[in-house]
Amino acid sequence: MSPLLFWSILVAAVPGVVQGAEPAAAVAPTPAVQLAELVAADKAFAERARELPFPDAIGAMLAPDAVMPARGAKPFLRSREQIVAYLKANPAAASARAEWVPVRGGVSADGKQGFTAGYLTITQPDGTKQPGKYMTYWGRTADGWRALAYKRAPRPEGEVDSVFRALGLPDAAAWRGTTQHDALDTLLAAERAFAAKAQVIGVGPAFAEYGRADAINMGAGAGYTESAAAIAAGFDPEPVPGQSIDWGPDFGIVSASGDLGVSFGRIIPKQRPPGLAADAPIPASPFFTIWHRDTPTSPWRYIAE
């Protein structure tokens, strides 16, 4: 029997194999599956971090053009090299180890960008522990998921809920076949409108209006503040709206699908801090806010900040 005849008989005998048939189209992973892959990547970086100094652990997960808010002359560091150097220059971070766990997260409709938020603990060489919170905005790259933006903040001791929960999982079908060339422009416009509304109705009411019901905020407590209503309630009432702070976006990142993105900007106090020289500029604080919209015609609403 010739080899060609042998293989023809073998293929014909295998159940389910049809000669000449086109391969079945691959089924796209659901947003839930794509988010699970992102969360697994975050946890994998956290596992590796146990063996690395904190700056190197963070550097390992950063994209080359990653962004991080910072203190000092530069409100934002805009490369992996700048971020790692900044962390290494901080004695409290240079030799520390870190562990973290994601507890909230979301993903874009095309599965190419997403975010995680969670709790971390930084341990100094002498055993001193510093609890904190973190938020990471991710992009899917040729090397796998990498952080496009990262921030962290200290938190007080206290019990927290470490069970993971998804936020704003998209309806992928609603975005299929759409073109969102102006997505970044509309996202930044939403941030500007948010800030402008706060000058009229007050910061708290504006946070209630422009946030999603499932939005999270780093807040001042041990855990995340959850829901736009709870976030809004955390702001002190203003005797006169528009007299406390103002802010605006400087730049941003948005998913190709147009439903998820992040804005970067600065918050400027409207009252001069006590002790600040009269001729000194009022210092601004950097921020980044993650935004989401349900459909191409839905308004942008913040989901994590």
Image: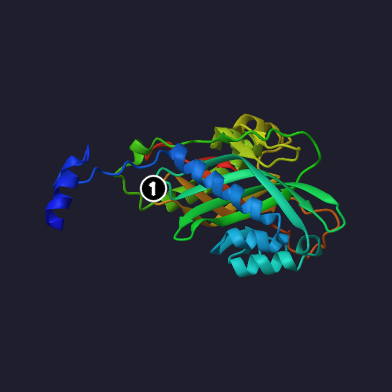
Nearest the viewer among 16 and 178 is: 16
**Residue drawn at 41 percent across, 50 percent down:** 183
> Label 1: which residue?
257
Q: Compare residues 215 and 280 and report the one nearer the observer.
A: 215
Coordinates of residue 16 in the picture (x, y in percent) = 22, 37
* Total numbered badges shown on the rendered structure: 1
Q: Quadrant of residue 278?
A: bottom right
Q: Position of residue 70 (x, y in %)?
A: 69, 60
Left or right of residue 186: residue 237: right
In the drawing, does residue 63 fall left or right of residue 133? left
Q: Is residue 148 visible?
A: yes
User: Which x, y percent locates residue 272?
Assistant: 77, 54
Q: Secondary structure at mark 1?
A: loop
- Image coloring type: rainbow
What is the residue that sits farthest to the front in this orientation?
A: 1
Task: Give the residue displayed 16% in from the left and 43% down from the top.
Answer: 12
User: Could you tell me which residue is drawn at 56 percent across and 56 percent down?
Assistant: 147
Q: Few, some or many C-alpha atoms within 10 Å of disc 1 (few <14, some 14-19, many ≥20)? A: many
Viewer can see residue 286: no
Which image quarter: residue 238? top right
Is 165 situated left or right of 49 in this image?
Answer: left
On the image, the x and y values in percent for residue 174 come to 34, 36
